[in-house]
């Protein structure tokens, strides 16, 4: 019979994953998540958690019918009540639905973040999964370019704190509706006579989602795009001054960026500022984060007319980047004490000792297999325990044992009652 394996494009996060698979080590995930949570706190973002699935319409209306996500990648199913449901392919629509439904606009909590799995039926490769995880942040209700700058500074600080130094922040403005209407007319007039020379994908996008042609990697498209009209030349006065202000704020905050006039992003809801962060260490899947402003979306979801801006970053790609760059990463905690009882009577005593130490927040482990001392010592050493103590009949009677330093192999006699004080001072 075939063994059970994780579905294609998905993976397990497990303790002890090492070598090539170290990015799946649960300790590293916990580390990254704790940096994310801490930085979110420092920037004033509050956590929201939304269901893993939503009504399909929530995503088709926001991410856009013409986007790759909606047209090819969604995990959509009909539930037993005959409703069309979709596993969340991205976090923004779900966050907004929750924000509106829970009337968060009436509270001080208008800056929210989430850490959650996202589901996209893509062709799996390194850095591209069918279930990936995003840290996302959304600010709802503030239209100023200062808010865009604060958000980008937040994203940038996260990468810095995690130890990612080799990165590019690419930024562009897709303007307001007025700018885009003018630009689309110019782009369409330019591309129409050249339609037959474009790649098949781009020909399809011409009618469905013209701006996405700018994103095309196909060489023949790139050639044609070289002399195409530039979006930035079509910005309205309002859009241009918004963009210029964001750029000057980034400069004064010392956040390096590159203007990428072709950056349009793959989701339909953006206006004004869009940005994407790429890591120089990764191959083709090098976008480690992206986001932008999406002012009309809350209203589109029948909420109040509130402007918004946000970003999402892929945790898998962050981990690949960190490991590729050999960035310093913390190692998992090791037990302060590893107890090895020899029989059931000593095991009962070991449980009591361990409970007392654990309540005092000392990481204590016991070999409850009651096998040979050798078995316990091997486990203690595999877990990197600092000290071990074997407990048998003699130790139970005398209420003391030999506390062995696993690194130096030195041992000294310590009474059970003294263990907490001795271990705490050794750990200081
Ligand atoms: P997105 O660019 O589609 O934006 O995804 C954000 C990040 O998630 C990407 O930059 C990448 O790091 C990661 N990512 C996306 N797809 C995959 C995949 N298949 N495998 C691994 N990682 C992936 C959004 O989803 C927007 N909701 C971001 C946003 C929030 N915009 C405004 N607010």
Image: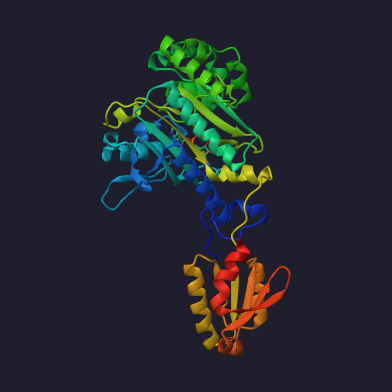
Q: Is residue 376 left or right of residue 138?
A: right
Q: Tell me the residue at 63%/65% (across/down).
A: 426
Q: Nearer the viewer, residue 320 or 119?
A: 320
Q: Is residue 282 above or below residue 173?
A: below
Which residue is pictured at 53% across the width and 23% down the height? 250
Is residue 286 at least partly visible in the picture? yes
**Residue pictured at 27% horizontal, 41% vertical:** 102
Residue 130 lies, with reference to residue 288, above or below; the image says: below
Residue 5: percent from left, percent from top: 54, 60
Q: Between 338 and 256, which is closer to the camera in this rendering?
A: 338
Q: Picture quarter containing residue 140?
A: top left
Residue 138, image x, y percentages? 41, 35
Rendered-image quadrant of the N terminus:
bottom right
Picture residue at 51% right of the left edge, 27% below the top: 275
**Which quadrant does the C terminus fall into?**
bottom right
Instruction: Name above or below for residue 9 compared with residue 173.
Output: below
- In the rendered structure, the answer to whether residue 92 lies left or right of residue 128 reads left
How many numbered badges does the structure rendering display?
0
């Amino acid at each position: 019979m075939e063994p059970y394996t994780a579905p294609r494009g998905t993976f397990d996060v497990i303790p002890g994953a090492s070598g090539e698979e170290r990015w799946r080590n649960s300790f590293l995930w916990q580390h990254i998540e704790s940096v994310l949570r801490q930085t979110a706190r420092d920037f004033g973002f509050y956590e929201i958690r939304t269901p893993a699935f939503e009504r399909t319409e929530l995503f088709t209306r926001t991410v856009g019918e013409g986007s790759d996500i909606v047209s090819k990648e969604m995990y959509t199913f009909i539930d037993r009540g005959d409703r069309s449901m979709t596993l969340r392919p991205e976090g923004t629509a779900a966050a907004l639905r929750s924000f509106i439904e829970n009337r968060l606009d009436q509270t001080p909590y208008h800056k929210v973040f989430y850490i959650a799995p996202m589901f996209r039926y893509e062709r799996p490769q390194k850095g591209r999964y069918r279930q990936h995880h995003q840290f996302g942040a959304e600010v709802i209700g503030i239209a100023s370019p200062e808010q865009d700058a604060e958000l980008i500074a937040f994203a940038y600080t996260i990468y810095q704190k995690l130890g990612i130094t080799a990165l590019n922040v690419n930024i562009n403005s897709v303007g307001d509706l007025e700018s885009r209407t003018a630009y689309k007319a110019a782009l369409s007039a330019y591309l129409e006579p050249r339609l037959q020379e474009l790649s098949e994908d781009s020909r399809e996008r011409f009618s469905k989602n013209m701006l996405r042609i700018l994103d095309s990697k196909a060489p023949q498209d790139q050639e044609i795009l070289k002399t195409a009209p530039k979006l930035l030349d079509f910005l309205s006065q309002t859009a241009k001054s918004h963009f210029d202000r964001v750029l000057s704020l980034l400069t004064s905050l010392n956040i390096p960026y590159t203007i990428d006039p072709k950056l349009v992003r793959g989701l339909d809801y953006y206006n004004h500022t869009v940005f994407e962060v790429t890591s120089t260490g990764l191959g083709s899947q090098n976008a480690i984060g992206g986001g932008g402003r999406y002012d009309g979306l809350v209203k589109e979801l029948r909420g109040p007319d509130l402007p918004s801006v946000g970003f999402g970053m892929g945790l898998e790609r962050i981990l690949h980047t960190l490991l590729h760059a050999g960035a310093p990463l913390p190692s998992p905690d090791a037990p302060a004490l590893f107890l090895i009882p020899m029989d059931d009577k000593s095991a009962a005593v070991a449980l009591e000792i361990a409970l007392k130490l654990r309540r005092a927040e000392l990481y204590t482990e016991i070999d409850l297999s009651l096998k040979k001392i050798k078995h316990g010592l091997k486990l203690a050493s595999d877990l990197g325990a600092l000290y071990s103590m074997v407990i048998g009949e003699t130790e139970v009677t005398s209420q003391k044992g030999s506390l062995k330093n696993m690194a130096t192999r030195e041992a000294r006699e310590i009474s059970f009652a003294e263990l907490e004080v001795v271990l705490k001072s050794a750990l200081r």
